[in-house]
Amino acid sequence: MDRSKKKNVFIISVCCLFIFLGAGIALASERLSVISSVANLRNGAGNQYKVLWQVEKYHPFLVINKKEDWYEVKDFEGDTAWVHKTLLGKTDTVISAKSKCNVRSKPDTSSDIILRVERGVPFKVLGRKGDWINIEHADGEVGWIVKSLVW
């Protein structure tokens, strides 16, 4: 192989390596959730930026960027905003991703429905059993939900 072909193979190999590394970093996003009763989501990294929306305790996010004490996060709908790092923690949480989700008294579809929730209701995860997740709402209600209904 002549020198120019070796150089081209090297350049292509290095480019592929960076693509694979970049994909690995993207897949390794940290998942955190709101630990305060309410958190403001802003359009920039600082209190001087406009509040875009608010979320309640246990709302989960993927961290996509960090700037000093601020995290840029993405929610289950793909929306992004900035939140102060002190408002987030590593509590295992989920959020209802479908409308009219049944929360049941036991981990089976024949058990009583104790709560019906709309899309976007966050819960703390207490445990898992097969395809079911034992959850707790911030107001203290506890039940079971099928994992296909949450993010």
Image: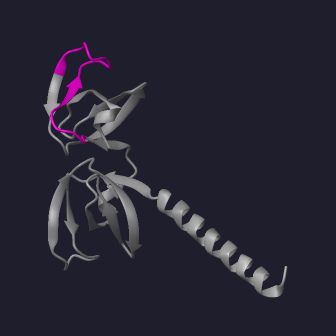
Residue depicted at x 33% and y 57%: 88
- Colour scheme in the image? one colour
Residue 56, image x and y in percent? 19, 51
Frontmost residue, 37 versus 80:
80
- Say if the magenta span includes residue 57: no
Residue 9, image quadrant: bottom right
Which quadrant, please, contains the C terminus?
top left
* Boundaries of the magenta span: 96-113
Residue 66, image x and y in percent? 40, 71
Residue depicted at x 39% and y 65%: 64
Residue depicted at x 16% and y 67%: 52
Q: Is residue 117 above or below residue 28?
A: above
Which quadrant, please, contains the N terminus?
bottom right
In the image: residue 24, left or right of residue 142 = right
Q: Is residue 97 above or below residue 44?
A: above
Residue 108, image x and y in percent? 31, 17
Q: Is residue 151 above or below residue 22?
A: above
Residue 138, image x and y in percent? 21, 41
Residue furthest to the top: 110
Residue 79, image quadrant: bottom left
In the image: residue 94, left or right of residue 23 = left
Our reading of the magenta stretch's main secondary structure is loop
Residue 41, image quadrant: bottom left
Frontmost residue, 131 versus 86:
131
Residue depicted at x 27% and y 47%: 58
Residue furthest to the right: 1
Count the numbered circles shown.
0
